[in-house]
Amino acid sequence: MNTIMKLKPIVFINQNVKEWQLEEAMRMCYNNISFSTYPYILYKLYSSYDTLNQFNSGNCIALSLFIHTYLKSNYNIHSYIIPASVPSIFRVEGTNNICHVSVCIPVNSSKFYIIDPAFYFLKPMHCSVKNNISREIQSSNIHNNNKEKIKYILQKSSYDAILPNSMECKCYFDHLPNDTWCYFLDEILDPDESIGSIYIKSKPNPFLCNTEYDDELQCVKKKYHLKTEKSQLIVIKDCKEIFNGDSKNIPNEIKNIIQNKLYKYLSNYII
């Protein structure tokens, strides 16, 4: 399925951006916003803006919107939601090559940052057109609590779906050098229509992944993970499965965890 995205060139404005402000926004996202498809699939919301505001959760669009809004509200820093691809290990069958979004924060005409909260970046990507060298940051693999290196460099975009003369940030995990993905330096105006809706159709079983930033270890850790497989509800706590069965048979102690720890991400009447 190919969907034409609505794109607009980024205006690389001059603004005062401190890296600690970006890191603060990332930590706030990891501690307060869950990656979840429950609002779209079970609660029938379409807009990621609505999922974020009503359930403090959503897909990569909602997480990116949180970063975008937080920076503007707290520091008057302007940013853009940009389209991206994903490595094949994360690719959902049925989605387009460009199936993801993140956030670009301009600093001046040649320097900017990229933040991908859905990939649990630990530092923002610092990019410079004038000093375009291979760089690296670390991200968290929340499924095994390991840190992983991401290497990246800027190059001219090779995707026909992207605006002419655009650039992309090409990335790969250090342990998977051939499995690359890209962040495209154009603003996407219709992420729910051209990316989010296709992702939801291609991954119809709802899930929720709740995280927190560990200040001592300086990484993002998974706290709770709810998912449905073959009509069975699976509940994971701290990367360990604690329930797998019919949702009607959830033990009271696990039901209490869901109600007390995850209430702001879920509807009262649907788990």
Image (cartoon, rainbow, N blue to C red):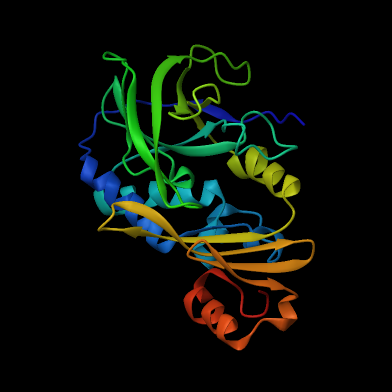
The picture quadrant where one finds residue 19 is: top left
- For the C terminus, which image quadrant? bottom right
Residue 50 at x, y = what percent? 56, 59
Is the residue 236 above or below the residue 91 in the image?
below
- Is 110 situated above or below 55? above
- When the figure is inspected, residue 130 is found, relative to residue 182, above or below; the finding is above
Q: Which residue is drawn at the image coordinates 53% and 47% (left, top)? A: 60
The spot of residue 224 in percent (x, y) is: 51, 66
Q: Position of residue 139 (x, y in %)?
A: 39, 42
182 up-or-down from 75: above or below: above
Depth check, front residue: 157 or 175:
175
Regarding residue 185, the answer to whether it shows in the image is: no
For this orientation, the residue located farthest to the bottom is 252
Whether residue 23 sits left or right of residue 246 in the image: it is: left
Q: Position of residue 4 (x, y in %)?
A: 68, 28
Residue drawn at (52%, 76%) of the image: 263
Horizontally, is 270 left or right of 7 in the view? right
